[in-house]
Image: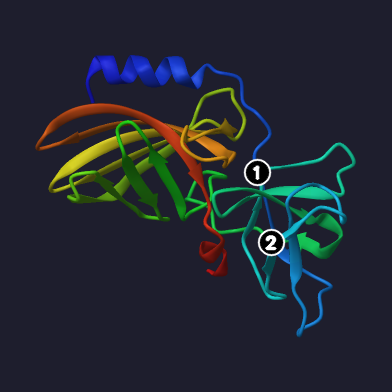
Amino acid sequence: MTRTALAVLACLAALPALAEPSYWRVAGVAADDTLNVRAGPSAASEDIGDLPPDQRGIEIAGTDATGDWGRIVWQEGTGWIAMRYLAPDPVQPIAGTALPAGLMCAGTEPFWSMQVSAGSATFSDISGAAVAMGLQGARVAEGRGAFPVQLGHAGPDGSSAALIRPGSCSDGMSDRDYPWLVDLLINTAAGGRYLTGCCHLPLETGFH
């Protein structure tokens, strides 16, 4: 990694950490019923969707002032679900960190995405080319608790260093409020790039 890349990561690691998202499963909902997703933190708010009674890996980005309602990424915006129908459901972390495996990270202007599993990552951009890389290492910033986490990946077609930390993040194109921020330094045959974006754990990932 270049000295410039190391300097960027060092500066980002010095940023204060925010409370990280938590992970839950639906509990106390009958097998033939669903958990309503509301447009706002109230039972009187519009019902904008439903979660099945066995839904797992629900990423709660935060709660309302009462703590009774949890905020989730839902479709093209934000949804709210009643915390009384949830139970803790820790997801698989990336070894040596508290960062959940399965995060989908992405950015706009330029458009790119990177799926981060427990042992690998796959990067793609608007060109459609995919770069598969294996996990080379993961570490937490010294003296910073659980976050930020620096991930290093490498493969035949490229390498990357990603710094991921909790924080409210907007993609600038939707009403979604993502719970993770990412700074990505990636090197491919096309050259080196420094990208920023948001991450979240897709609901379907929570079933591992």
Compared with residue 130, is residue 186 higher up or lower down, i.e. above or below? Answer: above
Q: Amino acid at mark 1?
A: Pro
Marks 2 and 1 sit apart, C-alpha to C-alpha, by 12 Å
On residue 89, the disc is 2
User: Of 74 and 31, which appears nearest the observer?
Assistant: 74
Q: Position of residue 43 (x, y in %)?
A: 87, 56
Looking at the image, residue 184 lies above or below residue 72: above
Which amino acid type corresponds to the residue marked 2 in the rendered image? Asp
**Residue projecting furthest to the front:** 46
In the shown orientation, is residue 100 left or right of residue 118?
A: right
Q: Residues within 10 Å of mark 1 (few under 14, many from 20)?
A: many
168 displayed left or right of 14: right
Q: Which residue is mark 1?
A: 21
State the residue in front, 119 or 121. Answer: 121
Residue beneath the point at 55% across and 33% down: 169
Nearest the eye: 112 or 161? 112
Question: How many marks on residues?
Answer: 2
